[in-house]
Image: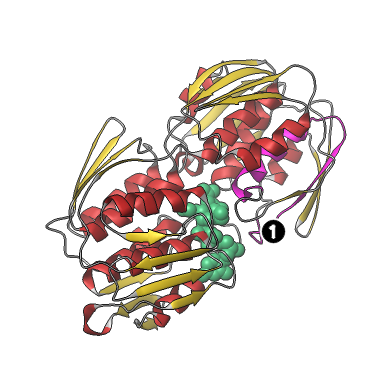
Amino acid sequence: MQKFIITGGSRLSGELTLQGSKNSALPIMAAAFLTGGVCTLDNCPRITDVYSASRILSGLGCKCTFSGGEFRVDASGAGGSEISAALMKEMRSSIMFMGAMIGRMGRCSVSVPGGCELGPRPIDMHLSALRKMGAVITDEGGRITCKAPGGKLTGAKINLPFPSVGATENIILSAATAEGETYINNAAREPEICDLCGFLRRCGADIRGDGESTVVIKGVKRLNGCDYTIMPDRIAGATYLSMTASAGGEMILKNACTEAMEPFLSVLEQTGCRIITGNDRIYLRCGARLKGIHDRIRTMPHPGFPTDAQAVLMAALVTAEGTSVFEENIFDCRYRHTDALRKMGADIEVLGKVAVVRGVKSLSGAVVTATDLRGGAAMAVAGLKAAGETVITDISHIDRGYENFEGAVECLGGKIKRV
Ligand code: EPZ
């Protein structure tokens, strides 16, 4: 298993072009199957979750090719409707293919998806919505089979108990070619949902209201393939900004989605960093020691503070002056990175969904194990601040969502090597 060796303690300085969004590319790749055409996705991140999704598409009969940052998928000859348990286990987004398969084939057979272990990650909202649209669903020993009577789902009014990102995306994918109109109330408003809908509209779908709490999808007879550019990855952006803020220094983040990153930036600037945004660039400079954030940092559905940025911001605040308090409201178990940060000298107390971070003057390098995608990145943020050497093992978690992570850190002047 590979690991990162990081030598911390130096200020960072550099420029970095932000990768394409993992959480946008994955549902859009599922949508490409739904279209049954040829789609070219530009700015598609070269990450292992995308390679997993590509294997799923190939298993469904698509022809997939990567050249540079462009992913091309020809779904015209594809006709599969089953995904193996092994492939489903590789990532959470495999569940997105349910909506795409039943939308195109009128049926699907999947298992419970994998993904970061952040606590129980049920799919009850996904299944309940599909049933409301007429799907007949059976679950035999973890193998879930869905069938649309007559091969077509029917539009329905769906009230989500929680603005689930995945459930919202699955419903949109299922409804795009269903009979009639589907209304999603309490829909998730994440920017990646708007990107998925932008792709689907380009393919001929009739969707409005994405980015708001009520989304209306009017089923169309058929979709066509298209060329599309994936939006930048706002969480990878938050990661690299947290890295530079923590170590001290300055950076320019290019090809950034400044508007989508606003919920994170508005919190980061409370640490005393200087942040200037313009079009698709973010300039950050951090001279002195960060200040602890006075107001509680509550993770919330967009446009609240993103749960995916909680770990990396926490890693930046462990050496801030003063105390910061986090409240994790999205997942039951998203503080798994705190043990590693404590091992490096952090003072963090976890009380249920609250984490109290008391700033310490310095950290020391240690050998730590990545627990999940964002938790692993948080360890790198802390390692670049810590005196001495930090070794992060099990970095396959980080490779799931960060394209050429060590290359990005090196662009910022960080000392890191993959061994
Ligand atoms: C997406 O996961 C993202 N993943 C996650 O990013 C992100 O943290 C999450 O949305 C929240 O923003 C992708 O887009 C691939 P949810 P998803 O459905 O869709 C509960 C990363 O680091 N829930 O909005 O799985 C669920 O357990 C990853 O890039 C149900 O109870 O998130 C959780 O507590 C991690 N039943 C909450 O809702 C359901 O049927 C939010 O989950 C569905 C969800």
Q: Quadrant of the N terminus?
A: top left
Q: Is residue 310 highlighted in magenta?
A: yes
Q: Residue at x 21, y 53 (%)?
A: 58
Residue 121 can be seen, yes or no = no
Up-down relation of residue 300 to residue 309 (above or below): below
- Please, which colouring scheme is shown? secondary structure
Does 312 appear in magenta? yes
Q: Whole-percent x and y of residue 416?
A: 54, 22
Which picture quadrant has residue 269?
Answer: top right
Residues in magenta, as a range: 305-333
Residue at the image position 45 percent from the left and 37 percent from the top:
232
Q: Is residue 90 above or below residue 176?
A: above
Classify the position of ligand 1 by quadrant: top left, top right, bottom left or bottom right. Answer: bottom right
Residue 117, quarter of the rendered image:
bottom right
Q: Amino acid at mark 1?
A: Asn
Residue 372: x and y in percent read: 56, 48
Where residue 105 sits in the image (x, y, percent)?
A: 22, 70
Rendered residue at 54%/45% (across/down): 373
Residue 116 or residue 39, whichever sits in front? 39
Whether disc 1's CB lies below 8 Å from ligand 1 is answered no
Q: Is residue 297 visible?
A: yes
- Front one among 395 and 21: 21
Look at 34% across and 59% down and name the residue there: 87
Residue 167 location (% of width, % of height): 47, 66
In the structure shown, which secondary structural element does the residue marked by tag 1 occupy?
A: loop
Which residue, as the protein is rendered here, is positioned at the far right? 322
Seen in the image, is 242 located left or right of residue 99?
right
Left or right, residue 198 beside residue 283: left
Q: Which residue is mark 1?
A: 329
